[in-house]
Image (cartoon, helix red, strand yellow):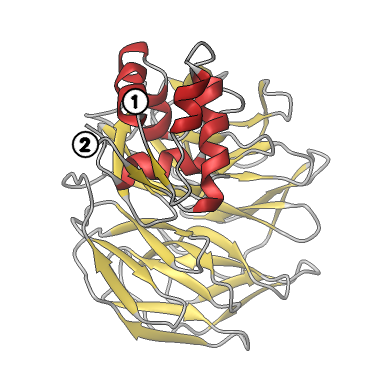
């Protein structure tokens, strides 16, 4: 690590303010001298080394927030898969094997509620409809189930059911809620007025896709799991395929839209990252950490622009910064022998909640406020290889 860091002029004042917050007793002259007019930061190395010993900036810069765990009201084996934020700020866990609904209120309290329909591996993932209803994506369920913004649970008839049918859902710009085909050989959606209908897919196979992402151009991308090709729903509702740069069995679980418009696939069994660029081309990149089968399950974009992968059996967290830098960080709870979490949700206060699949505790990443976190400082350190 060098003694100098190059930052853009726009970041300099922010860095000095950040350093002042972390080291309030530091000589003011040192902080003033830290920023030259050409954007070079002097003496930052000494401050950074000091921060490692104090346990402040080191973790903050690498994690991009504060990790914490919390108690859940209900846990079970494969209890939930995925979560959805509703219109009043509540995070609902989607019941897989769980026989109770579970949600995190806007004030952070965790509570449970009764479901009308349960069955083994019932639902996997969900989608928020324009009217505020959360639809559970049917996996082995033969009934649709939804929770209104007011908390009313109801069921409805599906047009198509099959074992391991869908995994996840995504809302289209026109208000349609699409279920993502896993084993299904028909697409299925719910219109804004509540009508359930099916449509033809361009490609199907067992375990084809898991989760979806709405791109800035209005296209819905299904995230490839066992699929040999990408598949998307374009604006007119037609399903089209496109070539992938990398495929393997059980490759990816879910995806995340980056601030620059790229769609990142979250690595499950894949040992290579992959994204769909804004021009529609696919591109691969090197990951900082991989594990054979069940590495990460879903991801979420943090308020500072970092993409965080949700740990399933991964022993470390992994994130991609807005600069494209991939790094790992320590977790408070990991499920090395079990699938700990499945899916993540961004709360209104900026917390990213990892949704418990088998984990006995909840885990969340909270943004730092007035505790030394700065996107500028984090980037400067990552760009220069922290020791």
Task: Please name the residue shown 49% across and 65% down the image.
Answer: 180
Give percent across and percent down for residue 288. 22, 47
Q: Are marks 1 and 2 in contact (CB under 8 Å)?
A: yes
Check the picture and name the quadrant holding the C terminus.
Answer: top left
Q: Residues within 10 Å of mark 2 (few under 14, many from 20)?
A: few
For disc 2, the marked residue is 1
Label 1 crowd bin: few (<14), some (14–19), many (20+), radius 10 Å: some
In front here: 115 or 129? 129
Q: Nearer the viewer, residue 381 or 41?
A: 41
Q: Residue at x 83, y 40 (%)?
A: 150
* Quarter that holds the N terminus: top left
Is residue 376 visible in the rendered image? The answer is yes
Q: How many marks overall?
A: 2
Q: Which residue is mark 1?
A: 48
Residue 146 in percent (x, y) is at 69, 49
219, above or below 295, in the image: below
């Amino acid at each position: 690590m060098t003694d100098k860091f190059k930052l853009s002029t726009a970041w300099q004042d922010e860095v000095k303010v950040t350093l002042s917050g972390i080291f309030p007793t530091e000589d003011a002259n040192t902080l003033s001298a830290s920023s030259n007019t050409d954007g070079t930061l002097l003496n930052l190395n000494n401050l950074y080394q000091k921060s490692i010993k104090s346990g402040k900036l080191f973790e903050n810069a690498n994690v991009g927030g504060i990790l914490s765990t919390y108690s859940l009201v209900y846990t079970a084996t494969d209890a939930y898969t995925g979560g959805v934020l509703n219109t009043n700020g509540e995070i609902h866990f989607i019941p897989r094997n769980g026989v109770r609904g579970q949600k995190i209120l806007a004030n952070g309290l965790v509570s449970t509620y009764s479901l009308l329909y349960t069955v083994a591996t019932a639902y996997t993932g969900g989608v928020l409809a324009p009217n505020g209803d959360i639809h559970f994506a049917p996996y082995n369920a033969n009934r649709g189930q939804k929770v209104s913004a007011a908390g009313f649970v109801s069921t409805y008839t599906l047009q198509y059911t099959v074992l391991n049918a869908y995994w996840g859902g995504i809302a289209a710009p026109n208000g349609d809620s699409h279920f993502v085909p896993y084993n299904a050989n028909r697409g299925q959606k719910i219109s804004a007025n509540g009508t359930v209908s099916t449509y033809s897919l361009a490609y199907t196979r067992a375990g084809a896709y898991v989760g979806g992402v709405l791109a800035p151009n209005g296209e819905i991308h299904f995230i490839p799991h066992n699929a040999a090709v990408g598949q998307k729903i374009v604006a007119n509702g037609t399903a089209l395929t496109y070539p992938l740069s990398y495929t393997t069995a059980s490759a990816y679980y879910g995806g995340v839209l980056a601030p620059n418009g790229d769609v990142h696939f979250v690595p499950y069994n894949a040992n290579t990252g992959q994204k769909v660029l804004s021009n529609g081309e696919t591109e691969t990149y090197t990951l900082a950490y991989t594990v054979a089968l069940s590495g990460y399950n879903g991801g979420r974009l943090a308020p500072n622009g970092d993409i965080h992968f949700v740990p399933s059996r991964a022993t470390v967290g992994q994130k991609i910064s807005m600069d494209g830098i991939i790094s790992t960080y320590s977790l408070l709870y990991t499920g090395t022998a079990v699938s700990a979490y499945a899916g993540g949700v961004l709360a209104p206060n900026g917390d990213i909640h990892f949704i418990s699949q088998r984990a006995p505790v909840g885990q969340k990443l909270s943004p730092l406020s007035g505790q030394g976190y700065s996107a500028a400082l984090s980037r400067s350190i990552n760009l220069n290889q922290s020791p």
